[in-house]
Image: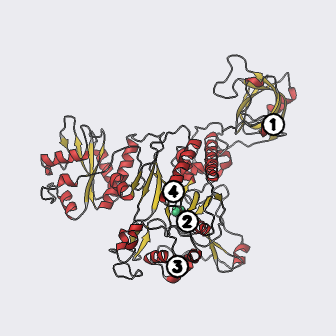
Amino acid sequence: MTDHLPSLATPYRTHTCGELRATDADAVVRLSGWVHRRRDHGQLIFLDLRDRHGITQVVIDRTDSPDAHEEASRVRPEFVVSVSGTVALRLPGTENAKLPTGAIELQTTAFEILSEAKTPPFYINDPEAPVDESVRLKHRYLDIRREPMQQRLLLRSRMVQAIREVHHRNGFVEVETPTLIKSTPEGARDFIVPSRLQPGSVYALPQSPQQLKQLLMVAGIDRYFQIARCYRDEDLRGDRQPEFTQLDLEMSFVDEATVTGFVEAMAIEVSAATAPDRPLLQVPFPRMTFEEAMDRFGSDKPDIRFGMELMDLGPALRGPDGAPASGFVVFDSTLAAGGQVKAIVAPGMAGVTRREMDELTERSKRFGAKGLAHLAIEPGGEVKGPIVKFLSAETQRAIVDRSGATEGDLILIVADTADTTADVLGRLRVELGDRLGLADPDVLAYVWVNRFPMYHWDEDNHRWDATHNPFSGVLPEDEALLVTASGDPADPSPDDPAGRARALQYDLALNGWELGGGSIRIHRRELLERSFLLQGQTADGMREKFGAVLDAFDYGAPPHGGIALGIDRWAMIFARQTNIREVMAFPKTQSGTDPMLEAPSVPDAGQYEELGLRFVGLPDKKA
Ligand code: ASP
């Protein structure tokens, strides 16, 4: 990307602060920017003048320009100044190879202070200086002046530009959808906005443009995309914000391969434009089913930059008749109860200390396991660990063989239900992979995961709940499963065939993060109604929540599908960050506040009054 465009000249500057080179020597120029640093040598004052394009050294000589020198002697860091003068080659030996403008300096003839600055609450000119995040957010406009934030916002801008270009080139229409709408559930709480013109009623801010983009398909738009702002009122984490941005797209007359094929090509182009120095692990992106991802990685967003896959120890623990026979009661009873015993191998960790092991066990318990067994393969091949005494030499060998461990490795074993085993080992794998430096930080490892279950059982509400999106289609061969054992879709139970149905849902993961997901949708009204019934919707509830889509499907709906990718998360990974706030210009804090604008805030008295509202406080939570 070129940052040095001649068209950036304005009445205040002939060039930017990053533009001048040795070939510009003797040119008469004018620059404007912020004072990055000032060095006062009496006769000579040196200023580093900064704008977002770079830094240029300015020299003010008392003899040559006494007025300019007097003005310049007043300036402090972050003053905004304008300097006119002549470009001169720096004296041999005083060039600065670190600066693109380091071969020259500006010899000042005229100097003007455009704006003065208080001493900032943190150093703008020291990108390494640690600054408390609350101070950065309070003065975000100063934080963004610093190089790291500036670079990240530029990266994000390049990324969105590339996204737009690829979509336009591929026949997509960019459509803006409203943000004052009706609830579009994506599994979070809605933000609501009271209506003044319709007292007593509210708009909901979109959790996503899901229904609107499907309506655009019914409207014949064919290929839609939007850089869409979404709002979800949920507890915040490092990779979540109450408002965030999605690349939202939808396509008509497509199957899963058409959508994922386009998205994959688009992602490859966007990666190359945004992070050209980061190699892709594998192209075409690997694809695996949800079942395979859980089985091998214990996660539906696997980080495939390293191995350490989950190994099923079952066959090593059973006797010739297939019955559990390891001799260790925890393993045997888990297998007898239909559970799983699985392991991961931590390379080179056989020398783990007792304290480290206690810490790993504690962690596993926090993840939901009852415990964590381990076997260390000592140099020489001897197997050690507290459970060794329960296992025959043969069983030990079988475990080591199945796990693939070699001398110096540590085998970590969880015995539990299939879900818990996968989840705990999946999380341990990521932690250890990180700790042992197994994942190449430069590589971008995209992976598709598909064939998710349509529903999971919602115990509390006694209904099936969509695992992803209530509009997701079902695999054609599983359509017959969208029924209940009772025969009445409104009377579901956990053993219904519906629990085995697989959705036409696909997720894209990147380096262990879920980048986004989408699906081929149900486009037939009666099938959508059946799916909604299984999800506990009454006929009235359906009309109330999804009436527009159901009605629209009566007027000719094309087969369609789409996806949404998290723009903030994507930019975060490109920028090698682990917190999306680092790639957002003005994010909220962990408690959902903006310390700079001081939002949210108490409304003016009149604002509530116009809406017919009064704040009566919240019920006492402890009661
Ligand atoms: N609306 C979905 C979401 O926001 C994405 C999709 O299915 O297109 O997660």
The answer to whether the beta carbon of the residue marked 4 is less than 8 Å from any atom of ligand 1 is no
Above or below for 33 versus 102: below
Q: Amino acid at mark 2?
A: Asp
* Residue 352 shown left or right of residue 602 in the figure: left
Q: Which mark is residue 233?
A: 2
Mark whose residue sits in front, 2 or 1? 1
Calculate the distance from the C-alpha at mark 4 to the C-alpha at mark 1.
Answer: 50 Å
Question: Within 10 Å of the Cα at label 1, are there few (<14), some (14-19), or many (20+) other Cα atoms?
Answer: some
**Residue denoted by label 1:** 13
| First-in-chain label (4 vs 1) | 1
2 and 4 marks in contact (CB < 8 Å): no
Q: Amino acid at mark 3?
A: Met
Instruction: Tell me which residue sits at (61%, 58%) in the image.
Output: 225
- As helix, strand or loop, the secondary structure at mark 3 comes to helix
- As helix, strand or loop, the secondary structure at mark 1 comes to loop
Q: Which mark is residue 258?
A: 4
Q: Quadrant of the N terminus?
A: top right
| First-in-chain label (3 vs 4) | 4
